[in-house]
Structures are given as C-alpha cells and as structure tokens.
Image (cartoon, rainbow, N blue to C red):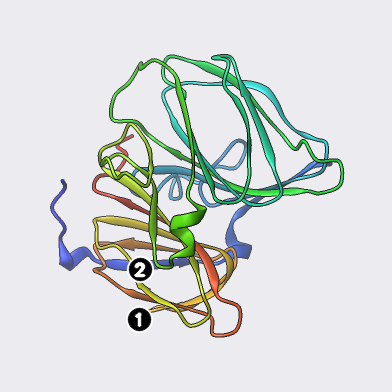
C-alpha cells in the first residue's frame, strides 16, 4: 500500500456539467475522465480508476460487438436493463442491484444492448486496471439488492475477497455502493485515492459541501469524511477506493 501523506491531502470537486460529453442518436454519455476522442492530460484517472462513464442508451439500441483487453470492467445499472453477450459464451441481463464484472484479460469481444423496446437504460460503466496482465478472460455477476436494502455502504466489487462483492483482479481497489435513505449518514473510506460519484439524488460531504447527481469528489489522502444524503430524496452513490494509482 502506498504511504498516505496527509500533507498532500485534498478534495477536488468535479461538477456534472464539467464532464466530457458524447451525444449521438442512441447514446448520451458523460465521461468523468479522458475517454475516446475526449482527452485532457490533466484528467486521465484517479487512483486505479481509469474510466467512469454515465451512459443512457435508448430503447432497442446499444454497443454492438467490440473488443477489450487487460481491463477490469464493472457495470452498474441505475434504471432499465442491459443485455451482455461476449465471445466466451457469457450472457445475461443486468438490472439495478446486479453487480457485473468482465475481465478482458488476453482479449474478449462483447456487446451491451438495451433489450427493452419501451425504456432507455441508464448505467455507470467503470474500468480499473488489473494488477496482473494477460489473464484468461472472465465474467461474474451477483445480485446485491438484499445487502443494499440494509443501508450503509456495501462492497460490490473488490480485489480484497469480500463475500458480498464480485471479485476484480486488482488487490488495491474496492467499489462501494450505497442507496442512502433521506438523511442517512455514512463514512467515506479512508484511503490514498477515493472517487465519490453521486449517481442519483444529492448528498452533503463533510468539509466539501453539497454534491448533486452527476457530481464527483476526488479525495486524495483526505481521511474518513462523513457523507449525508439529502433529507428529502436520499442518494445513490458509487465510491471507489484505491491503495495505489496508475503509472503512465
């Protein structure tokens, strides 16, 4: 684990409207970091998190078959359904509360389509660099709705072996998700790099202020901060903690 230097601690707030934006006939996508044709050398990742895209795909459309390699790809659906198929024979419907991970490894082809004719699908897709290259491709999904209903933050993708989480091939990273009830308070993990994304609703982050849907806070050695969901509508939050960072 990298040493956490409190002298370098900071909280960097990124507002929803400041993200890169891709809008085409079937896709409305907001990128937290450099992605595709959008590039900013000062905004390429945070910790071990390389991609965090907030995507809305129209009914009956989607990402047709395309390749990936050497990446841990985690998908979290907020509304609607997303159908996954890949070249390893894995397929399934991802819905809210079903955590899904695809390890691209030595190479995999997959598609992500909206199978519904009557509803758009809204989801967050996140990419984390693996700690081992050239692995055999893999796939895992796990329904965590029961754990989320209990409140608090739930580890849903982890390289640390938590039973309630899908496994990722990165020992230094964990994704926590919380469906916070109105007024509920949780403690944001204390680690070298933490990326807090408000997917729905709004919340108040200690010593940083209000975060609305689409806003993010990038914490660097910032300590364990309290996060309190909006008193009227609550919040759904996704929090990545990383012990290391990407070296380019």
Along the line of sight, the residue nearer the viewer: 168 or 222? 168
Residue 26 figure quarter: top right
Secondary structure beneath dot 1 equals loop
Residue 218 figure quarter: bottom left
Residue located 24% across and 48% down the image: 243
Along the line of sight, the residue nearer the viewer: 231 or 192? 231
Residue located 63% across and 21% down the image: 66
Tell me if I can see residue 238 in this picture: no
Q: Is residue 5 above or below residue 80?
A: below
Residue behind mark 2 = 11
Report if the CB atoms under discs 2 and 1 are less than 8 Å apart.
yes
Q: Position of residue 7 (x, y in %)?
A: 16, 67
Q: Using the image, tell me which numbered label, if any, was put on residue 207.
A: 1
Q: Position of residue 4 (x, y in %)?
A: 16, 57
Residue 109 left/right relative to 246? right
Tell me if I can see residue 125 in this picture: yes
Residue located 49% across and 63% down the image: 149
Badge 2 density bin: few <14, some 14–19, many ≥20, Cα 10 Å: some
């Amino acid at each position: 684990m990298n040493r956490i230097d409190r002298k370098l601690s900071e909280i960097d707030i990124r507002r929803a409207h400041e993200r890169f934006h891709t809008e085409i006939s079937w896709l409305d996508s907001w990128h937290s970091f450099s992605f595709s044709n959008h590039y900013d050398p000062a905004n390429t990742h945070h910790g071990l998190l390389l991609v965090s895209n907030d995507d809305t795909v129209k009914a009956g459309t989607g990402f047709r078959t395309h390749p990936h390699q050497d990446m841990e790809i985690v998908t979290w659906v907020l509304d609607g359904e997303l159908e996954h198929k890949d070249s390893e024979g894995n397929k399934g419907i991802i819905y809210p509360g079903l955590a899904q991970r695809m390890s691209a490894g030595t190479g995999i082809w997959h598609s992500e389509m909206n199978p519904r004719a009557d509803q758009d699908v809204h989801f967050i897709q996140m990419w984390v660099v693996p700690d081992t290259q050239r692995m055999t491709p893999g796939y895992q999904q796990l329904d965590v709705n029961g754990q989320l209903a209990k409140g608090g933050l739930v580890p849903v993708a982890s390289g640390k072996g938590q039973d309630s989480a899908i496994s990722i091939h990165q020992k230094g990273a964990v994704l926590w998700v919380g469906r916070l009830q109105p007024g509920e308070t949780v403690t944001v993990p204390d680690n070298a790099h933490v990326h807090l994304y408000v997917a729905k609703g709004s919340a108040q982050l200690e010593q940083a202020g209000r975060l609305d849907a689409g806003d993010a806070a990038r914490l660097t050695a910032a300590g364990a901060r309290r996060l309190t969901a909006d008193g009227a509508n609550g919040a759904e939050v996704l929090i990545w903690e990383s012990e290391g960072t990407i070296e380019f």
